[in-house]
Image (cartoon, grey):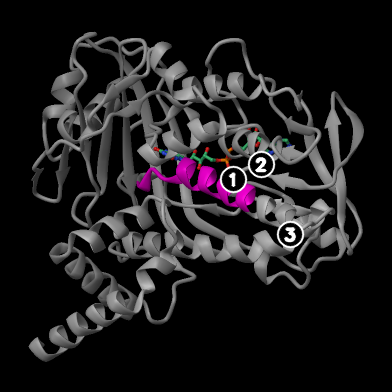
Amino acid sequence: MVLGASIAGLAAASVLSRHFDSVVVVDKDIPGETPKPRRGVPQGTHVHGLQPRAAILLDTFLPGVTDTLIAAGAVSIDFGTKMRSFLADGWVPGRPMGRETLSLTRPFLEHHVRAHAEQIDNVTFAWGHRARRLAGSESRVTGVVCEHEGVEHAFDAGLVVDASGRGTRAGAWLRDLGYGELRKSSVFIDVRYVTCNYTRPPDDLSGVIVRHYPHCKLGAALLPVENDQWLLSLSGRFGVYARKDHEGFMASAAELPIPDVHDMLSGRPATTPVTAYNFAHNQLRHYEAMQRLPSGFVAIGDSALALNPLYGQGMTSALAQAELLGNTLSELLEDGATDAATVSAEFIPRQAEFLAEPWRRALLGDTIFSEAHGDLPGNLDEIRARDAALAAVAAEDREVAKLLAQVTQFAAPAAELARPEIVRRVDEKLAGNVAAD
Ligand SMILES: Cc1cc2nc3c(=O)[nH]c(=O)nc-3n(C[C@H](O)[C@H](O)[C@H](O)COP(=O)(O)OP(=O)(O)OC[C@H]3O[C@@H](n4cnc5c(N)ncnc54)[C@H](O)[C@@H]3O)c2cc1C
C-alpha cells in the first residue's frame, strides 16, 4: 500500500508494481480530469523545476512519460542558455548545458505522471481515502485504516509505504503501535513563496532566476511553462516577502535587484490568482533511530526529508528514494526473501545514509543566513571548510567535478566522495589553507 498519490507515491507505486501482485494507492484528494492545483499539494501552484535526473528517473519508472509531457506542451529548453541567473551582484555567465530541461507547472506534471501510473495493471487507486492510522502491532505493521466519506475502511498490506508528504502523521501512528518516538531534526529557514502566472508570447522561451544572498532576501524564478504562460514565483526570506495581491506582487517584482523580471511581465494579463506558501523548516525524520524499526513500513519523499524548496530537489530526492526502495527489494528477492516486511530493516538504514548528504548540503546553503537556526551540527565550520576544499579540488579536476555533480544530483552515492584519493587531496587543501592563514 502507498499512502499519498503525489510524486513520491506515484513513483513508489510503479516500483512496487514490479515486485508485488497488487499495489493500492490511497490519497485523501480526488484529482480532477484536467491539470489543476489540489488541496493535498498546496505547494503545487509554485515553481517546480524538474531536474534532468528527475526526468530520467520518471522515465525509468513510467516509460514514455517525458515524451507525453513534451507532446502535451511542456517547454523543453537548455536552461544554461535560456535561463539567465543573477547571483549576489551580477549575472552568472550562461553556457550551454548540452541537454534540455522540461519547464512546466506542477499540476500539469502530476496529471501526466498519474495518468501513466494509472495504466499499470496491478496498481489501483482509492481516491478520497484519508489514512487515519496504521494497523498492526509492535512486531509489524500490517495495513492502514482509511476514512472515506465518513466511514472507516481497513486495508491489509504486506508493506506500507508512507508518501503523504511533510505533514505526515506516521510518527504518531508508529508511537501508538509501540515503536517509540520518531525523532525529527529541524532547522528554521523561513522561505515564503508568492506566485502568479502570466501570458507569454509563444516564441519567447526565456526565463530569469534571481538567487538569494544574505543582502538579497527576495529572489525570483520566472519560467516559461505550458499553455504560453510565464510562471513567476517570488521567494522571500526572513521578513522580506512579496506582496499577495496582483498589484502588490508586481510592485514586489520591481524591488528585485534587476528590472528584467518586472519588465518582461509588465502589461501582461495574469492567468491565475496570486498564491502564497510558507516553508518554515528543513525537516529530516530519523526512522533509523526508532526504538524498533517498524517492520512492514517505510516512508519516502517529503515524509522522510523535506528541504528548502529553493534547492529545487524535492522531487528528485523522492524519485531517488523510490529507486533505492526498488533496488533494495530486488536484492532481497534475489537473496530469497519471501516476507515483504523484511525490506524495512534493509531500506531504512540505507535511506538514512542516503539522506544525510542532501541534509548536510542544505544546512551549508541555509546557514549563510545568520537567522537560520535549529538542529545544527556543532562542527558546522569544519564541515563548511571541508566542503570548500572539496570544491577547490573539483575546480582543478574534471573527474572530481563530475562526481561531485552526480552526488548533488542524487546520481551517485556520497560515499564515492570519500575515496582515499579524494580525501587525501581535500586534506592537503585544508592543510594549505591553514598554513596560508
Ligand atoms: C513552494 C515549493 C516549491 C517547490 N519546488 C520544487 C522544485 O522546484 N523542484 C522539486 O523537485 N521540488 C520542489 N518542491 C518539493 C516538492 O513539492 C516535493 O518534494 C515533492 O512533491 C515530493 O513530495 P511528496 O510526494 O513526498 O509529498 P507531497 O507532494 O506533499 O504529496 C503528499 C500526498 O499525500 C496525500 N496525503 C497527505 N496526507 C494523506 C493522508 N492522511 N491520507 C491519504 N493521502 C494523504 C496528499 O493529498 C498528497 O497527494 C517544492 C516544494 C515547495 C513547498
Q: Residue at x 36, y 15 (%)?
A: 226
Mark 2 touches mark 3? (CB < 8 Å): no
**Left or right of 372: which side holds 422?**
left
> What's the amino acid at mark 1?
Ala
In the rendering, which numbered label is found on residue 335? 3
Highlighted magenta segment, given as a residue range: 311-327
The tag earlier along the polypeptide, 2 or 3, is 2
Q: Which residue is mark 2?
A: 164
Report, in whole angstroms, how far the alpha carbon at label 3 lies from the one at label 1: 20 Å
Q: Nearer the viewer, residue 133 or 248?
A: 133
Which residue position holds label 1?
322
- Which one is earlier in the sequence, the residue at label 1 or at label 2? 2
Relative to residue 238, is residue 420 depicted above or below? below
Q: Is residue 171 visible?
A: no
**324 part of magenta stretch:** yes
- Give the left or right position of residue 317, taking residue 76 as reference: right
In the rendered view, tell whether residue 413 sits above or below residue 44: below
